[in-house]
Image (cartoon, helix red, strand yellow):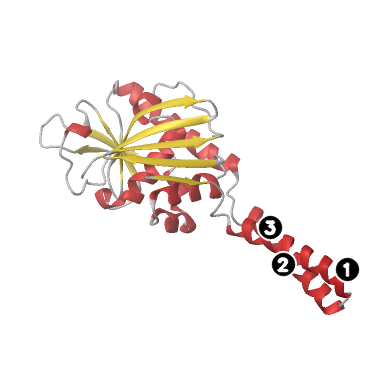
């Protein structure tokens, strides 16, 4: 499966561009060919509506980038301090709401890898949780980095759509964190190419656990969209693209 979705969800942008172009063409044709005032006015009216739609695209669709980045970075700073203090080395598991019965969470195993354990259908809303049958299956349950951004009502609607649409609508259309998203799925692995990401990867220790900020956001969205626990398998930069490979797990 391959989906390339760039700006198709920016409905105001597409509508505005179409109306401005069609209105200008119609008004010009009416003026040159017929000089019929009502037709000219109709064309100009279409142009005005198109301009308003373009303005709405810039005012209603976007959440300020600086605010988004600040929330994401503050989440990583907090989690980085925790994982360094506990010397955690296992990769985080991003969980859907069906497992946590609440906000979007990430499970960070303290010793064992959560991907090799059988997760319960529901995890208690506690900081320290038992996620497997073995006594050492203990982990930290934290709010996923950037999860607060995904609590907006408009974002909730996107999370219930097909994965490629959800990723593009949120990452590209709403937060303007990239210019395009390309999704390919192969069994339990999902390869996601983020084009022209505005988030830096950095080299903090927490990134080996949580993934980079962009990978973390991508995994959080994917977990909820697919209603499955998700781990970040690997990341790599390819030119202006940021390739993120996720792996799904049955809860």
For marks 1 and 2 on the same chain, the one whose residue lies earlier in the sequence: 1
Q: From the image, state whether disc 1 or disc 2 is nearer to you.
A: 1
Instruction: Tell me if I can see residue 37 in this picture.
Output: yes
Question: Residue at the spot x=56%, y=34% of the render?
Answer: 196
Callout 1: few (<14), some (14-19), or many (20+) C-alpha neighbours within 10 Å? Answer: few
Element type where label 1 sits in the image: helix
Q: What number is the disc on residue 49?
A: 2
Comparing 21 with 96, the one in front is 21
Q: What number is the disc on residue 146?
A: none
Element type where label 3 sits in the image: helix
Q: Which residue is mark 1?
A: 32
Give the percent coordinates (x, y) of residue 143.
Answer: 36, 41
**Quadrant housing residue 240:** top right
Q: From the image, state whether disc 3 or disc 1 is nearer to you.
A: 1
| In the image: residue 2, left or right of residue 92 | right
Q: Which residue is mark 3?
A: 17
């Amino acid at each position: 499966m391959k989906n390339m979705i760039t700006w198709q969800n920016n409905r105001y942008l597409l509508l505005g561009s179409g109306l401005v172009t069609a209105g200008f063409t119609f008004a010009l044709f009416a003026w040159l060919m017929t000089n019929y005032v009502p037709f000219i006015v109709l064309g100009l009216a279409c142009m005005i509506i198109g301009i308003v739609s373009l303005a709405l695209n810039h005012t209603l669709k976007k959440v300020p980038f600086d605010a988004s980045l600040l929330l994401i970075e503050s989440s990583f700073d907090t989690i980085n301090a925790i994982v360094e203090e506990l010397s955690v080395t296992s990769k985080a598991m991003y969980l859907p709401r069906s497992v946590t019965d609440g906000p979007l969470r990430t499970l960070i195993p303290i010793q064992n890898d959560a991907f090799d354990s059988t997760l319960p259908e529901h995890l208690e809303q506690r900081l320290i949780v038992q996620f497997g049958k073995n006594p050492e299956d203990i982990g930290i349950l934290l709010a996923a980095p950037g999860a607060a951004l995904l609590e907006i009502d408009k974002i909730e609607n996107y999370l219930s759509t097909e994965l490629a649409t959800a990723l593009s609508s949120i990452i590209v259309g709403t937060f303007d964190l990239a210019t395009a998203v390309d999704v390919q799925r192969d069994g339990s692995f999902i390869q996601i190419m983020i084009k022209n990401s505005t988030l830096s990867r950095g080299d903090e220790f927490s990134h080996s656990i949580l993934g980079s900020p962009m990978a973390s956001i991508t995994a959080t969205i994917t977990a909820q969209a697919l209603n499955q626990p998700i781990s970040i398998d690997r990341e790599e930069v390819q030119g202006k693209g940021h390739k993120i490979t996720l792996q799904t797990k049955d809860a």
